Image (spheres, coloured by chain):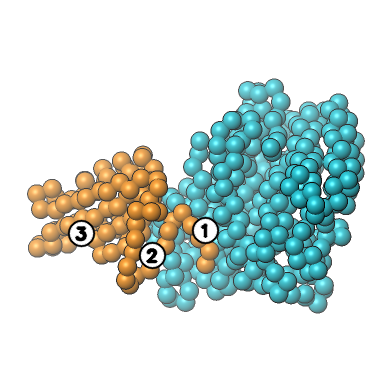
Amino acid sequence: MKKLLNTLFVTLPDTYLALDGENIVVKQEEEILARYPLHNLEAVCTFSYAGVSPALMGACASRNVSLTFMTRTGRFLARVIGEDRGNVVLRKEQYRISDNEERSARVARNMITGKLYNNKWILERATRDYALRVDVERLKKVANSLGETMKLLREVEQLDILRGLEGSAAVQYNSVFDDLILQQKESFYFYGRSRRPPLDKVNALLSFAYTLLANDMKSALESVGLDAYVGFLHRDRPGRASLALDMMEELRGVYADRFVLSLINKKVVNDKGFYIKENLAVIMDDDTRKKVLKAWQDRKQDKIMHPYLNEKIPWGLVPYTQALLLARYIRGDLDEYPPFLWK
Amino acid sequence: MLILITYDVSTIDSEGRRRLSKVAKKCVDHGQRVQNSVFECILDATQFRRLRFELEELIDKDTDSLRFYNLGDNYKSKVQHVGAKDSYDMGDPLIL
């Protein structure tokens, strides 16, 4: 199994990243703040505005280190992608599936099934672990209806129907998401999903976690030679990494939502770490963002048993293993795409 | 795994000084300089063999020496630091 390497996050506003030999060097004015060997890194994610030297961009691209630029508030700006290499035969087959509604639906169906299965488990775990603190009956009801929807999904061959079922399941899951927040309830609450901009703290955290996950997913797909921009459930739209969004569906709940919940329930973040902009957008302050990033990196090191591979791997490699399994399916080595089913 | 690399390169003549800077450069490329001629490098087995080969090519075996200490994967408990010069742990989250 591939080794999980480290990610470098640069949150300081005025740093410049450059290449020196095989090292990435982080400079502020003329002072060198840090120097890391590139071969220890898997990704570099910068929130700074001073920039990155072209030499470093080239080095990252050729060594498969993903280099992502974000705004100060954590919105995605750009990624550096090198020369297109990899398996053109695999990619062409991916395009053929994407152009065919029925074949797309077969893959997308499995992804959505994975999502519902995982979300169902999140709710059921909550009823088991916090039986005295949550409304067990309410959660159980939603969990059961997610189970019912999963049965309906089995035979679906039209993407529209799939989206409909997925949408109604999402509404149900969101309706009880607030119940899973057990601490700091007066400042953290969830009434519904809002984005661009997120209008409350929970949505701000969710948006940030989804952005981080989407970046990990995009690099994972590219590293196995797939095109992150050609999806099955999400249709083509310029600049949208549709396949990464497809692949995220099954991980949103177990990877990102649970991460956000644990930040709140374990009081890693608190009420004071956010401020509201004029357009009502809720933004994290720099300190909170750092804490969230640190927790994200720590979470990636946690080990889990991969249910399909039957191998113990760090959470951080789950996007990569799923990308690998998808590539195997597209190549014809697997009969079905096996989604990540959390236990 | 964590490999600790230390070296002594004879700097009596200019040829030696040139070797020293080449060895130092090679080590900087692969790890963290923790003291003047001491480097900590996180490498996998292949990277280690390659680095070791390249370093051996650089030195003059009659006058210089290289030492490699393999501290394995569970190196965190094996290293303690006292005094000046901060270092980072390549396994920890890297957030600046």
Q: Which residue is mark 1?
A: B93
Q: CA distance from mark 3 to mark 1?
A: 32 Å
Pick the residue in front: A74 or A268.
A268
Q: Are marks 3 and 2 on the same chain?
A: yes
Q: Nearer the viewer, residue B17 or B10?
A: B10
Q: Chain of mark 2?
A: B
**Rendered image: mark on residue B87:** 2
Residue sitting at x 33%, y 72%: B84
- Number of other residues with Cα within 10 Å of mark 3, as a class: few under 14, some 14 to 19, many 20 or more: many
Q: In x, y percent, where is residue B73?
A: 40, 45
Q: Nearer the viewer, residue A232 or A127?
A: A127
Q: Quadrant of residue A78?
A: bottom right
Chain of the residue displaying label 1: B
Q: Are marks 2 and 1 in contact (CB under 8 Å)?
A: no
The residue carrying mark 3 is B20
Say whether disc 3 or disc 1 marks the residue closer to the N-terminus.
3
Which of the two labelled residues, at mark 3 and mark 2, occupies the earlier sequence position? 3
Corner quadrant of residue A137: top right
What residue do we see at 79% from left, 35% from top?
A: A113
